[in-house]
Each structure stands twice: as structure tokens, then as C-alpha cells.
Image (cartoon, rainbow, N blue to C red):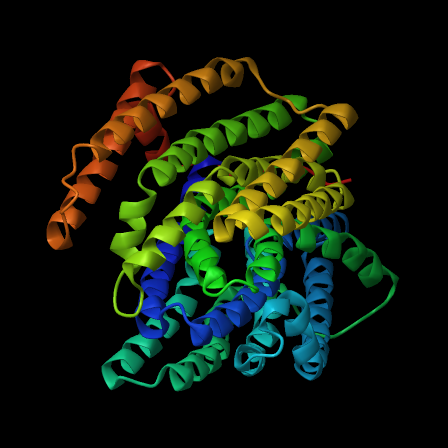
Amino acid sequence: MIRSFLTVSTGTLASRLLGFARDSLIAALLGTGAVADAFLAAFQLVNVVRRLLSEGALNAALIPAWLRVRDRDGEAAAAAFAGRVLGTVSAGLIAISIAIAVLMPLIIMIIAPGFVGSATLDLTVQSARLMLPYLAFAGPVTVLMGLLNAQGRFALTAFSPLLFNIALIAAIAALLLWHADATFAARMLAAIVGIAGLLQLLMLLSQRSARLAAPLRASFDQEMRGFFAKAIPGMIAGSGPQWLMVAGAVIASATPAAVSWLYFANRLIELPLGIVGVAMGTVLVPELTRAVSSGDGDAVAHAESRALELATGLALPATLGLIVLAEPIVRMLFEHGAFGAEDSAATARALMWLALGLPAHVLIKALSPAFYARGDTTTPLLATAKGFVVAIALAVVLGHFFGATGIAASIAAGAWSSAISLLRKGTGEFGFSVDAAARKRLPRIVLAAAAMGALLWLTVYLVPAEAHGLIRFIVLGLQIAAGITVYGLLLQVLGVASWREAVNALRKPAPKAPDAPCS
């Protein structure tokens, strides 16, 4: 499981790093004015729909259903089932994209009411419409990725999203060299989004994954209706962090540049969230589905315990690091071109508050698979809805007094509300299985992360205020390297992890056990 986790998290890390490069170039190209707000609001809308489908959300329903059909009726029946899912998703998304294109002005008015009555509204509508073709490709991509994940083939699904960012980076670089007008550049980038989605689909179709879903046809029979009744709640719940950001953007649209500040701050949150959360959802769902279906309580406890340890061990130090080093990180990544020092300071303040919600987001990703494996996609949906309502209610108040910083704090509070709801519901219904090893290691992980955070806090005061350019880059790199090194050594000293044993285990070929039959 950990080997698969590392495969997915490595691919996600590479994609997120390319995403940082992409967003740094977008900041230099568009800055934080009306054009940037319009483009980023539209891009955020597309990102929400992309996350509804991808990054493990559709796995919640597709993987258990596909495994049941395969084990009950054979490979051919499973391929036919997948072909109907693929055809239905594709046809549905084409119809939805057309409807969204027609209703786009109304949709933008709802998600960005602060744009109403300004030229920013028209710019947002234009950008969003140009991005819509991406949705037609996102559905087939997600189904094919889910089928590969169900077979334990995680490498291709982990690395195929890189094409999306590579295409956008190439386009932005060309526009920067061309010194393109900001409005024209935003429209060109919006159009490239669809092309990037097509590249990802073509890459998956060139592999064996296409044969896992055949013949291709759309169907709305009873079996498909039952499948989507479970899939849709899971898809919405799986994109909880994006819904919370949409809630924040709705309120932030009334404040100039606030949408941009929150967007760039959230991009830094998505790095650790992607590495831990996406990998958690991708790997844990098939793992827990097999364990729950076979009635193997020890396997369930082992998967849930290791997931909780990984989630805590990666999310907590990332949270403390982002809080302590918020401003130098933002300045290094984004303070170029049209993105100034004032933008860096505002983005860093938002980042510090958003980071407080990172452990909650990761906890949700670790807890939700326990429900999905039991065929329950409604409980995570209700938890997501509760967090959304909490975030909106608080953002109305805190956003009025504290601007983007208050909205960021509201988003973090919404995430914790969702996480606590899942924890209470799961404990009451079936009890989360945490073994003795996890109960021993978790407090030590917290202690090691706290010590690392204290070290980073001390190093901030040792950096000269006038440091800039290459010196600033070197100092930040040394701070991050020191934090990672100290944290790793503390985990070893405290007996949480033995790096030699971990490396040796990863080198050994894992025996392929037969899949447990799914009931």
C-alpha cells in the first residue's frame, strides 16, 4: 500500500510543482487586477468540476462497483460495465457543457456576485466559455484512470496530469516572450485549457486502458442509475476543498484582488494536500474495499492506521512550515512582474490561515474511504455540505472585517467542521480501527513536527530583512532542508520510522495476492 501511495504522491508532487511554475508565470503575466481576477475565477470553476471527477473522487463509486461486477461475472462483463459508464459520463458531460455555456452569465453572477456591473463579469464569462471543452475530456480521462487504479496500476494515472500543466506552461511562456496584452493572453490561456485536457485523454487512450471499457455506449438503465446515485455524492464530497474555495471566492469577489490572493495562497495548500490527500483517496479506496468485503478486520485496521499515520506525518509538518515560512515562500514563487510586494504580503496572510485547515482536509481524505468502501457516499457529502455552510456564514462576517484574511480563516473553519462531522459519524456507526502501533506513533509524530516548527520559527529571525534575489532563494532552501532533515531525524530517534527498513521494504517485489471477492 505504501509503495502505491509513494507512486501516486510522486506523480502528484511533480504535477503540483509544474502547477507552481504555471501559476508563477500567470502571476507575472496577468498580475492581480481585473483581468487576473476574471481568468482565475473562471479557472477555479473549471478546477472544481475537474476535481468533482478526478483525483480519486469517482473512485469512490467506480472501483467498488467494477470489482463487484468483475468478481461476479468476469472480465468481459466488467469491461462492458465500464464501457457504459464511460459512454454515459461522456454524453452527459457534453450535454452539461452546452447547458453551462448558455447559462454562464448567470453562473458567474452566482459564484462571483462582486463582478456584477463591471467589465470583469464579461471577461470571466468569456474565459469560462473558452475553458468548457476541457469538461468533455475530463470525464473519459477520469473513468479510464479509475479503471487503472482498480487494477492497482497507479503510475500512469499519477503522471498523466503533468500534460495539463506542461501545455499551459508552454503557452504562458510564449505569451510572455511575445509581450501579449493581458486580456488577449487570458483568452488564449483559457482556450489552451481544453487542448491540455485532450492531450491527457489521448495519452490514456494510447495505452491498454482503452480496452478496459468496451464496447462504448451510453445507457441510463437501472444499473447505471444506481451507479450514479452513489457516484455523484462521492464526486461532490471528494472535491470538498474546492467547494470551500468557491465559497470563499463568492464573498471575496466584492473585494478588489482578493480572489487572486486567495487563489495563489490556496495553490500552496494544494501541494501537500495533493501529495497526501489525492494519494490517500486513490490507494485507500481499493485497499479498504477488498478488506471490508472479505470481512478481514485486521486488514481494515492496518489500512486505516497506516493511512492516519501517513496523513498526520506529512500534513502536520507541512502546515507548520507553511505558517512559519508563508511570506518568504510567496515572495519567492509569485513576486515577479505585475505581482508586487503588497500582493505578496496579502497572499502570505491568507496562506497562514488557510494552512490551519490543511490537517482537516487531509483527515477528510483519510476518513472518507472508510465510508466509500462500505458503499456510503452520502455521509461524506453531508459533511462537505456542512463545511460549505459554515465557511459561507463565517466568511460573510469575517470577510467584512478582515478581507481576504478573514475569508481564509472561514475556509479553514469549514474544513474542520467537515472533518469533525466525519469523525463523529464514523465512530458512532462502525468505529475507526486504530491499532496499537498507531496509538504509539501518533503522539511522537506530533512532537517531532512541533520541534521542527519551532526550529523554523527561530531561523526566520536569523535571516537579514534586506535579503533578496539569490540570497533569499538560498536561505529559503536551507530553511526547508533543515526542517525536513530535523523532522526525519526526530522520527528515527523517537522510533516512529526506520528509514533503512523502509527502503529495504520498498526494494522488495511485493507478492501479488488475489483480489478478495466482493459481496
Residue 498 in sight from this viewpoint: no
- In this rendering, position of residue 29 left or right of residue 428: left
Q: Position of residue 232 (x, y in %)?
A: 74, 57
Q: Which residue shows up at 65% across the image and 55% down it?
A: 58
Q: Name the one closer to the observer, 208 or 22.
A: 22
Above-or-below relation of 229 to 195 = above
Locate residue 50, reporting x and y percent.
57, 63
- Above or below, comparing residue 54 to residue 390 in the picture: below
Q: Position of residue 158 (x, y in %)?
A: 45, 55
Q: Nearer the viewer, residue 494 or 103?
A: 103
Counting from the top left corner in percent of width and height, residue 413 is at: 59, 39
Query: Do we see residue 123 in this rendering?
Result: yes
Residue farthest right in this picture: 222
Q: Is residue 316 above or below residue 249?
A: above
Q: Quadrant of residue 104?
A: bottom right
Quadrant position of the C terminus in the picture: top right
Snapshot quadrant of residue 366: top right
Query: Image point 32% across, 52% down: which residue?
Result: 330
Q: Residue at x 58, y 44 (%)?
A: 410
Residue at x 31% of width, y 24% of height: 454
